[in-house]
Amino acid sequence: MQRLTLALALALCCITQLIHAQNITLEQKTQTNLNLDIYSNDLAHIQDSRILGAIKLNDSITIKDISDKILPHSLHIFKAGDITEQRVESPPTYQQLLRQSVGSEISLIEKNDLGKEIRRSVTLLSVDTSTAIIDNQGSIETIPLHSKQWRIAFQNNTAKGFTSPAIRFKSKGKKHTNNILLSYLSSDISWSMNYILAFNTKNQKLELKGLASISNNTATHFNNANISLRSDQPQPAKKRSKTTATSNTALYKLLKRTSIPPGQQTLIPIVQAAGIDAKVSHRWTSYITPQPNKKLTPQHPNSYLSFLNSAKDQLGKTLPAGKAKIFTHAGSQAFQLLGESDLAHSETGERIELLLAKAVDFSITQRATGRQDTFDGSITSSQFILKNSSAQSRTLTLSVRFNHPSQIISSTYPVSNKQPLSARWNIAVRANSTHVFDLNVRLKHPRYPN
């Protein structure tokens, strides 16, 4: 008798809990904090805090206003008691609506020749990936699912009221009011870096502005969020190492909370500096062989802009890799686009170098001035005419490559670096001037005819 009484009491308790189970919905207005760690590969780690009161066993909690691009397998719910079940529910797809409507009435809507819509009610009997079987007033027919002639209308209750993704969970309950924490990954959120550089050609100073471009390609508005921009890639916990790190792994935390609207790109300045010491230099590579080219065609070297990532110049911080647009001006003169380049990831103390374009105001003309045969090769004489038409002095890094082992006999300028098959010179060329560089080289090779 006592056992029966105990069983009845337990059953009554369970029934009471089921009867009094609540359906609780948490919308965005219950959000107390939002953190976004955004990666550069269309992925973000979202941590969303919502306030939730005491809950009982079998209470059903629905959380709305989450990312519609949530990756369900990444969801973790904290501080909500022991979770007994959780799922992410999304609006149904076309195929899901069709499968849910099997055995029910649907409407086929098509337009006649006059453009008027005609609606027919039929019963959906079965469906596969491309064809549906219907009962049309006792006639069993097949229709293609993807047709330009008609569209399908479903009953109102087919979608079960889902218009946006939601998280649903149950737990063993919790006694206190506190913030629960949702942690999940979302696709279609990314960031990239863009730089605008203004180079004053008169005083050789540079202004730099770095803009983080955050792309939110979800349908979700992330309101008043703490945002961190990461340049590494997320890894499973078992692959992470606390003792190892790479130089291009960095975290850029925005100083202010920011709202990221859906389907938009938001630009946020994270680096600004002015008065940076910078210089423009030129590089050109030449080739000297026993049979030199006698053409006198002026060539234009590649132009580079370089500066130091130093605290002295208001930098001295990690700079993410990104696209850089370089403008030039002289004092009050209007800005002109000098070029666009890739700025590589840079740490404090590193020299940054950007490839600009061909230097139209600097030319190099190379010509062969003589050749003398020797018992083991030849002596080749060359002349380089360096013309700087700009109003500023320029440094030319001239690299010469030889197709045979070489020895420099004489050179107008001192050699900066010499290898058996190459040599390099750094030559300062004054503004609006022409310099002549003569070079005599011994090449060791089989005898060539003149």
Image (cartoon, rainbow, N blue to C red):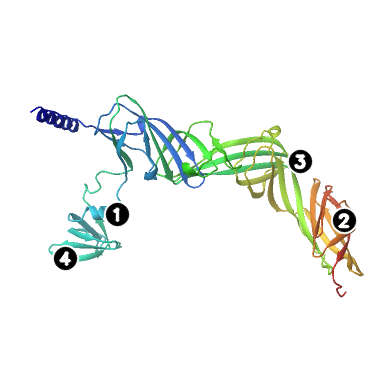
Residue type at mark 1 is: Tyr
Q: Where is residue 406? Give x, y as percent.
A: 85, 61
Q: Which of marks 1 and 4 is nearer the N terminus?
A: 1
Q: Residue 202 carries which label?
A: 3
What residue sits right under mark 2 in the picture?
437
Distance CA(mark 3)–CA(mark 2): 28 Å
Report helix, strand or loop for mark 4.
Answer: strand
Q: Residue 48 carries which label?
A: none
Distance CA(mark 4)–CA(mark 2): 92 Å
Residue type at mark 2 is: Phe
Residue 276 in the figure: left or right of residue 255: right
Q: Where is residue 429? Give x, y as percent.
A: 83, 49
Nearest the camera: 11 or 96?
Answer: 11
Residue at figure coordinates x 14%, y 65% from the top left? 139
Q: Nearer the viewer, mark 3 or mark 4?
A: 4
Q: How crowded is mark 1: few (under 14 residues within 10 Å), some or many (20 or more)?
A: few
Q: Where is residue 141? Give x, y as percent.
A: 19, 66
Residue 38 in the figure: left or right of residue 381: left
Check whether the beta carbons of the residues at disc 1 and disc 4 lie within 8 A of each other: no
- Looking at this view, name the residue that lies furthest to the top: 176
What residue sits right under mark 1 in the picture?
94
Q: Is residue 219 above or below residue 107?
A: above
Q: Which of marks 3 and 4 is nearer the N terminus?
A: 4
Q: Where is residue 323? Give x, y as percent.
A: 60, 47
